[in-house]
Structure formats: structure tokens, C-alpha cells
Amino acid sequence: MSKQLSFLRLQRASLGQGTLTRRFSLIPNPVAKSRFSLLARAGGLCPYSPTLQGAGFYRPLKTGLRMTLVTALVLGAGTVALPGSWANSVPRMPLSSGIQTAQIPANARVIYVNPVLGSDRPDAGSSEASAYQSITYALSQATPGTVIQLAPGSYTKDTETFPLTLPPGVILRGDESQKGQNVRIIGGGSFSSPTFAVQNVAIVPATDSTIAGVAVTNPNTRGTGIWIESGAATVRNSTFTSNLREGIFVTGTSTPLIENSVFTENDGNGISIARSAQGEVRGNIFQNTGFGLAIGDSSAPMIVDNRILQNIDGVVVSNSAKPIFRNNVIENNERDGIVAIGDALPDLGTAESEGKNYIRSNTRYDLYNATRNNTILAVGNDIDASRISGLVEFVAATVAAGFRDIGGHWAQPYIEALAAKGVIAGFNDGTFRPNERVTRAQFAAIVNKAFTARSNQACSAFTDVRSNFWGFEAIQTACRGGFLTGYPGNQFRPEQQIPRVQVLVALASGLGLRSENMGVLSVYSDRSGIPDWAQTAIAGATEQGLVVNYPIRDRLNPSQEATRAEVAAFVYQALVNAGQAEAIASPYLVMAP
């Protein structure tokens, strides 16, 4: 892997052996004169007040179709002034595209749980055929070293007593290959935290316990998925969604390992880290989940190899926290990539240990140092210098290797495989831009490269596609092959971004995969949103294994505009169905019931 350092000179600043770096001064903001702080306590949002005490958990509130951020999440005691303007690809060491699933120790005792077929009686639990019904009962029978193996299904307040408290050394295990999307723990209960008083929590793991392959949702007010207070618990290959505060809260002196999990659509944050907690957050995806991470107090976790995108802010670091960031992708967040407030001092790379973070394309700043006096070191990162604000000693780095913006992306194996076949390509800057939307004309071009059209459908020229338009031939070929049709008035609308439902209908129609089996649509929780004209095509696409839904497998999102990554996954699966490509394992591949 080749690497090239570029140095930006604004004013001299010594770093290591006389390295020149760029030093950014804090940009004055007249709105910031009206600084404020909030009185808050753990578990509640409190009104404005001249002081801030305890820990605040502030989440973006959704009002109608507009999302308004009330304030930032601030952890710890003290008065913190917030910037007043808050209301308004990459050289990487790629993450593994495979799912690392730990093996059960040979001498481990295994207890089986099945919420539908099981029974909580003393003589059960020893096999899949004779399982306990509830996790709660299984935990009462578990000793250190016990593996509690969960069958697919939903574990709710109907059978469980929340919070579920894992004893030391116990492994709670669902389906790691699916990141737990078919093993759902839904609920929460009162937990008295030694550091944050009473909380509402779904699971409380003790030291050396492990949670793997489950999907956790706490739908209660200010609900937290997992609360880690002390010790070295492990959470891996799991999904955290629709928690009404955060997916995981880490506090006290805990040193957990949280890896290879997905955090999406939580109301507050993906993960909150407080007090003097440390540990490691590695290889996770934080997407559309309030703040990806909120790190406060004197905590100092390692944040490594994560993808943090499309959140309100990627990471908010407050109080005197000193997290270490290495090899992360932080992009396309609605406001800022990384924000430091209070007396925070995040480590984004030094001369001895480069950051290798890719922090770009965030709406306002990629890196915002809003502390009063601290200077942040950011050596060896790929950051847009024009989107840095505050005192930052920055040394840029660029590493060229393949598509530089898909390392660790959920669709990385599909993108790379399809690119190897010459069906798709990247951009001149070395990026693929997986989250960009695809137009109808672009999709027509992809279809023509992937498949040999049957050319058995009459197709006249469209009134809005001139013969000198770059995609004219591709559109005509895709139309004659039965993949795409036009709109009333003989229009094609080539520059219109194509919805997911149209992509799947096109593939099913052009490849002759439509099905009358409407029962297969029951796999989608949002099946009511599938238009009548598309149902036979979606049924066929589902039966034939074309549908890949990220991040929630049972959510089709039919009217959502398709991204380049999604189109790559759909088209690749169509090639697999046609016997023209090898199958790729993915936890997001929809399986027909």
C-alpha cells in the first residue's frame, strides 16, 4: 500500500522533528455569544439553566418532517458553553467483509432457549428440542462459562423480566451470521446504576460476559439497550435499533469490547461513553442514529475501524474525555464529523501513530474543535482542510488502494465483485461513492453491462431523451429488453433518481422472475408500502434471492431512492440467480419464508 503525506502551511508549529503542520484558528461566530448550558440528569431532558450538573442525554427531536436538534449530548459535571451555530474516497485499512463468529468452547455447558416452543421447567434447556422458553429462566440456571443459545424469535416482556442481568462469564448468543436480526430482544426495566441512578435498560452484562448475535430494542421512554457499568464485557455481531435513547451506555470503570455491530435509528446515540470508562469500539456501523457516539467525562476509549455516517453529528466529545480515533470513516453526517467541546482532547493521530481516519463530506465541519484552549493533534488523516475549525495541528495523508471509500461498507463485497466483472466503475478520484443516488439513465447503463437484453419488447423513442443524450442507446436497449418502461406522455425521465421498488421491478421483469405468490411479501414489515403494480415483481425478486435490505433486513423501503451500493447488491444477486456469479454471504440478504 503506497502512502503520500501532504503538508499544509499556514503558520509554523513544531511537531516531532520539525514537521510543518497547519494550525486552524477558531472561527468567530456571532451567534455563539448567546452561549447556554443545560441542567440535566441521567435519563432526562431538562429545561435551560445557567449550570450543567450530572450527565445530560440530549437527543434530536423529530417534529413533523423536520428534525431539529435541541442541544448536544454532554456527559459529566461542570458548565459547558455550546457553539451557538449548532442549529444550522478513503485510503484505509479495510474492515473484514466477513463476519467473525466465535466458536463455542468445547467444554462449555450450553443452555437452549426457544420463545415459541420452549418451556421454563427444570428438566428442559438441554437441547434444541427441549429448550427453555425465556432468557430470564435460563439466566437463573447459568453459571460462569455457560452459553445460552437463543433460537430465532422475539424475546419480550410477555416472557422476560427486564433488565436481563448476565452473570460473570456467561455468553448470551443468538445468530451472529445475521447480526441478530432474527433474534430480537425487545423491552426494558428499571436498573439502579451506581454512577447514574435509576435507568431503563434491556440488558446488563457483568464482567467477562458476552452478548453476541442479537438485535436489541428498548422501546421505553429514555430506554437504553445495553448498560455496561464495570468490567470487561464483550458485545459483538449484534444490531441496535429503535432504542429511545442509545444502543449501548458504557460508564464507571468498564473496559468493554464492542465490535462488528450495527447501530441505526436510535433516538439518542449509537453508543454513549461516560465517567472513566475505556475499552474498545471496533468495526461497527453507526448510521442515522442521532449522534453516532457521545463520549464524555474522563473516558478514554479506543475508536477503531468504524463507519460513522448520516447521523446528526458523527461523534461528540465533551468534558475532559480523551478518546483515540484510528482508521475510522466519518462522512455524510448532517452537521459535523467530530466535535470537541468543554475540555475534551481527542487523539486523531500523532507523529508516532498516525490517525488514518477518513473524515469528509460532513455538511458543516469535518473536524470542529470548539474547546476554549485545547489544540487537537490530527496527524495522518484524510480530511478536507477547508472544513476544519478550531485549534488543530493537522497533517494530511492519502493512501491509494482500490475504491478508497468502501472499506468496511456493508456492500463492499458486492461492489468489488461487480467492479471486477466490469459492470460498475468508480470515479476519477478513486472513490465509488456508495451512498450516492442512481438515476434511471444510470441504472439503464448498469443493466446493459450486467445482462444480455432479450430485445423482445417494442420501444419507441422517448420524448425527453434526445438521440445525442449520453444514455440514449442504453435506455433504448433496457426498454426493448423489458427491464424499463416509461411514464405517461411517452416520457422516460432519465435524470430522475430511481426508487428501490423500480430497481427490483426492472430486474424481475427483464429476467422473467415475476411470481403470483403474494404470501412471500409477509417477510417485509412495510409490505403495505409496495404498490399494487409492483407486487408480483417484488414477490418474484424475493423468492429468487435478489433483495438485500440494509440495515434492517425486513424493511424494504420501496419508495426510497436507491443508492449505488444498493443497486450493486441487487444486480449482483440477480447475476447469482442467473448462475453468472458466486453467492456472497450477507446478513442483509432477504430469505423467502
Image (cartoon, rainbow, N blue to C red):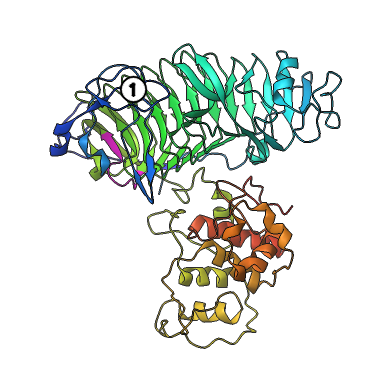
* Residue at the extreme top: 194
In the rendered structure, the answer to whether residue 321 lies left or right of residue 79 reads: right
Which of 276 and 399 lies nearest the eye of the viewer?
276
In the rendered image of this protein, does residue 547 appear above or below residue 535? above
Residue plotted at (68% across, 54% down): 522
In the rendered image of this protein, does residue 271 appear above or below residue 60? above
Tag 1: amino acid: Ala
Q: Specify start and end residues of the magenta stretch as a single range.
A: 360-368
Asked if residue 7 can be seen in this view, the reply is: no
Say few, some or many: other residues with alpha carbon within 10 Å of mark 1 (under 14 / 14 to 19 / 20 or more). many
In the rendered structure, the answer to whether residue 295 lies left or right of residue 186 reads: left
The image position of residue 144, as x and y in percent, is: 70, 13
In the rendered structure, the answer to whether residue 351 lies left or right of residue 392 reads: right
Asked if residue 355 can be seen in this view, the reply is: yes
| Residue 536: quadrant of the picture | bottom right
What main secondary structure does the magenta stretch of the protein show?
loop
Which of 418 and 151 lies nearest the eye of the viewer?
151
Residue plotted at (57% across, 39% down): 96
In the rendered image of this protein, does residue 337 appear above or below residue 302? below
All told, the count of numbered labels is: 1
The image position of residue 357, as x and y in percent, is: 39, 37
- Based on the picture, tell me whether residue 117 belongs to the magenta stretch: no
Q: Secondary structure at mark 1?
A: loop
Which of 162 and 402 lies nearest the eye of the viewer?
162
The image position of residue 321, as x and y in percent, is: 35, 21
Say which residue label 1 marks.
40
- Based on the picture, tell me whether residue 365 belongs to the magenta stretch: yes
The image position of residue 453, as x and y in percent, is: 62, 77
Residue plotted at (87% across, 20% down): 123
